[in-house]
Amino acid sequence: MEKIPDQLGYLILTEDGAVLESGGDLENDERVATIITDLISLSNSIDPVAYDPDEKFKKITITYDDHWFIICISNKKIYVVKRNIPTSSIDNVAVNV
Amino acid sequence: MQSNREESLLHSCFGSLTSAFMGCCYSICHKETDPQENVVNERTHLLEVPEQQQETPSPTACASTPPRKSDEQTALNRILHETATNVIDVGALGPYSLEAGAYSERVRAYTARAASAALPPPAPPRLLADLPPAVRRQMLAAPPINSTDKELITNAVKKAASAISELRVEHHEDLVVPFRVP
């Protein structure tokens, strides 16, 4: 698993939700694995009329105040990376005059 | 003179009598030998009565149950024989075994036929596309979403959620109305 900037942890799962690799904050985190797998199956049941059938989505992100998760599917595996949001970027919102 | 006339009269009477008698004999004798004769004469029957009723009117009147039971019996036997010929009794078949070669050949033939006939199962709907590794690396390393975009999304979803929660049914008229039939 390649090095991602601001990475706090990562998970690589099978399409069924079994953990293949894990590291950092997400090491051996079966709970997060289950949540992510359920989220993906939920997203699969969205009515296709809501979006263009030719347009496929590339990632799902879950953004919190200080960290965020990015979820991708590649080679029939689910890649989850927990990344840090630098505090300087949070300050940008407040500082904007 | 008178005796001659009487004699001739007697002779003619006797002659007609003999011809009538011979005719009767002839007709009686020939009745069985010419049954197929289609000539319509004074001897043909006016009504064609079936022979069964002619021959056995009395036996059927007296004894009705035994022939009916035999009819039932014949009908049951007929059904039995029809079923026996049409139905395949799997349990009664003897032990059936295939040779190893014939078995493997059949397995090959059937799998080939099944593979050619079967369509691939339709792919389940997926929201996320399967990315090639290069695109994945790019995606995972991409910066997070803009904070303004995040505010926009959050506000829009909050408004939508509150709007949906305000959906309600307004009662105007009665649902149940009696029919007024004059």
Image (cartoon, coloured by chain):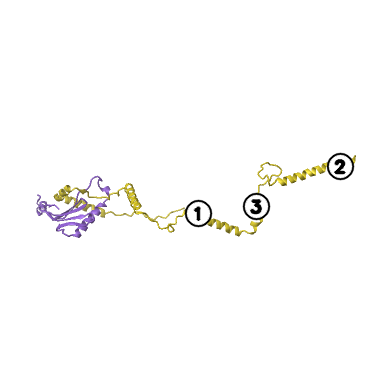
Q: Are marks 3 and 1 in contact (CB under 8 Å)?
A: no
**Chain on which label 3 sits:** B
Q: Are marks 3 and 1 on the same chain?
A: yes
To which quarter of the image does residue A19 belong?
Answer: bottom left
Q: Residue at x 65, y 57 (%)?
A: B59
Secondary element at image label 2: helix
Q: Which chain is yellow?
A: B
The dot on residue B7 is 2
Residues at marks 1 and 2, CA–CA distance in whole angstroms: 80 Å
Mark closer to the chain start, 3 or 1: 3
Q: Amino acid at mark 2?
A: Glu
Q: Are marks 1 and 2 on the same chain?
A: yes
Determine whether, in the image, residue B108 is placed left or right of residue B84. Answer: left
Q: Which chain is purple?
A: A
The dot on residue B53 is 3
In the depicted structure, whether residue A69 falls above or below residue B2: below
Mark closer to the chain start, 1 or 2: 2
